[in-house]
């Protein structure tokens, strides 16, 4: 399963998972589904990302992704992550979810 994740993604997830219950849940899900295709995994990642965008807005989500990958812009992200982020940006624009959401 890990061969389908972008380079460095599993390491980043491991680091985040030390403190993040949502990431722990995703890693557990991945480990419990060894027979999933790359497309299945990608679709699951996109659905989880959409959920996060709905809660915080795309701009916050994008900023977090850039921080995770130590990237200055989307262009500096791994190709697979860049393409995913571009798709999510289009989706978020259609849904009116680009702006940051206030956190309480």
Image: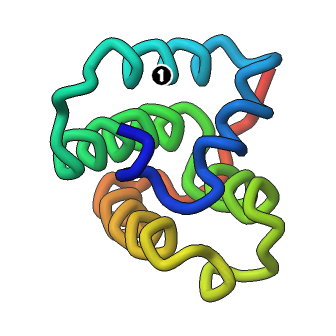
Q: Mark 1: which secondary structure? A: helix
Figure quadrant of the C terminus: top right
Residue 11 position in % (x across, y down): 70, 43
Residue identified by numbered label 1: 26
Report whether 4 appears left or right of 76: left
- Describe the colour scheme in one phrase: rainbow
The quarter of the picture where residue 13 lies is: top right
**Number of marks:** 1
Report whether 48 appears left or right of 52: left
Residue drawn at x 60%, y 50% as measured from the top left: 9
Residue drawn at x 74%, y 62% as measured from the top left: 69
Residue drawn at x 67%, y 57% as measured from the top left: 65
Figure quadrant of the N terminus: top left
Residue drawn at x 71%, y 44% as measured from the top left: 12
Nearest the camera: 14 or 42? 14
Nearest the camera: 92 or 69? 69
Residue 24 position in % (x across, y down): 60, 15
Residue 8 position in % (x across, y down): 65, 56
The quarter of the picture where residue 91 lies is: bottom left
Report whether 44 appears left or right of 99: left
Q: Is residue 64 above or below residue 50?
A: below
């Amino acid at each position: 399963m890990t061969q389908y994740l972008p380079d460095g993604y599993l390491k980043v997830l491991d680091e985040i998972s030390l403190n993040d219950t949502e990431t722990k849940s995703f890693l557990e899900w991945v480990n419990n589904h060894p027979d999933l295709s790359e497309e299945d995994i990608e679709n699951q990642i996109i659905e989880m990302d959409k959920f996060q965008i709905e809660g915080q807005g795309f701009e916050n989500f994008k900023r977090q992704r850039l921080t995770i990958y130590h990237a200055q812009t989307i262009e500096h992200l791994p190709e697979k992550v860049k393409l995913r982020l571009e798709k999510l940006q289009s989706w978020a624009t259609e849904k009116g979810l680009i702006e940051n959401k206030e956190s309480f």
